[in-house]
Amino acid sequence: MLFLQLLLLVILLSGGDNKNDFQEPVSFQLIQISSFYNHSLEENLGSGWLGELQTHGWVRNSDTTIFLWPWSKGNVSNEEWRDLEDLLHMFSIGFLQIFHNSASQRQLEYPFEVQLAGGCELHFGKASVGFLYGLLIKDRIS
Ligand SMILES: *[C@@H]1O[C@H](CO)[C@@H](O)[C@H](O)[C@H]1NC(C)=O
Ligand SMILES: *[C@@H]1O[C@H](CO)[C@@H](O)[C@H](O)[C@H]1NC(C)=O
């Protein structure tokens, strides 16, 4: 579901046409960096990237999307954006809970940071590829 929405976003942001002369893959990804300080405090920073260009931002612990370019919204309506924000919010809550649970079961020790990147890559004339990467960093924040 989330993957399909992201895929749609890539198509809309990249113009939805096949006029890409370079035939390079277009990717859109969301990156979330979560710093876990203790069982009641964590800080989240989100961003959206079309290739190497940042297109969207989410400020600390807020679900409201910041559109960095006039076209960042694509053709997605406000209502559809709110749906996408709700979906990301639900996903984020579940994901944060998993790490807090690991910490409460002493599999992880505060503080730690988790970086998550998920999105999809669109190859013209080929199937698109979804991806999700995670990175756990310890001893970096204090
Ligand atoms: C986006 O909306 C504009 C104007 O409403 C329309 O002309 C255009 O074809 C739409 N593009 C896509 C990819 O749906
Ligand atoms: C969590 O960490 C913050 C910042 O270091 C601190 O202010 C807060 O009291 C801590 N909360 C608990 C429950 O330890």
Image (cartoon, rainbow, N blue to C red):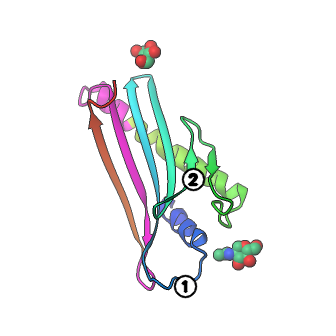
Q: Is residue 63 left or right of residue 52?
A: right
Callout 1: 10 Å neighbours few (<14), some, many (20+)? few
Locate residue 119: give its quadrant.
bottom left
Magenta stretch: give its range. 98-127
Q: Is residue 106 located in the magenta-colored stretch of the structure?
A: yes
Q: Is residue 122 left or right of residue 114?
A: right
61 lies above or below 72: above
x and y percentages locating residue 100 in the rendered image = 37, 30
Residue holding disc 2: 56
Instruction: Say which amino acid is labelled 1.
Output: Asn
Locate residue 58: give its quadrant.
top right
For the residue labelled by badge 2, is the local secondary structure a helix, a strand or a loop?
strand
6 lies above or below 22: above
Q: Is residue 44 located in the magenta-colored stretch of the structure?
A: no
The Cα–Cα distance between marks 1 and 2, rounded to whole angstroms, is 24 Å
Mark 1 CB in 8 Å range of ligand 1?
no
132 lies above or below 66: below
The circle drawn on residue 141 is none
22 lies above or below 80: below
Instruction: Say which amino acid is labelled 2.
Output: His
x and y percentages locating residue 11 in the rendered image = 56, 72
x and y percentages locating residue 82 in the rendered image = 66, 51
The quadrant where ligand 1 appears is: bottom right
Residue holding disc 1: 18
Q: Return the disc, 1 or 2, that comes first in the chain's sequence.
A: 1
Q: Is residue 109 left or right of residue 24?
A: left
For the residue labelled by badge 1, is the local secondary structure a helix, a strand or a loop?
loop
User: Could you say which is closer to the camera, residue 1 or residue 140?
Assistant: 140
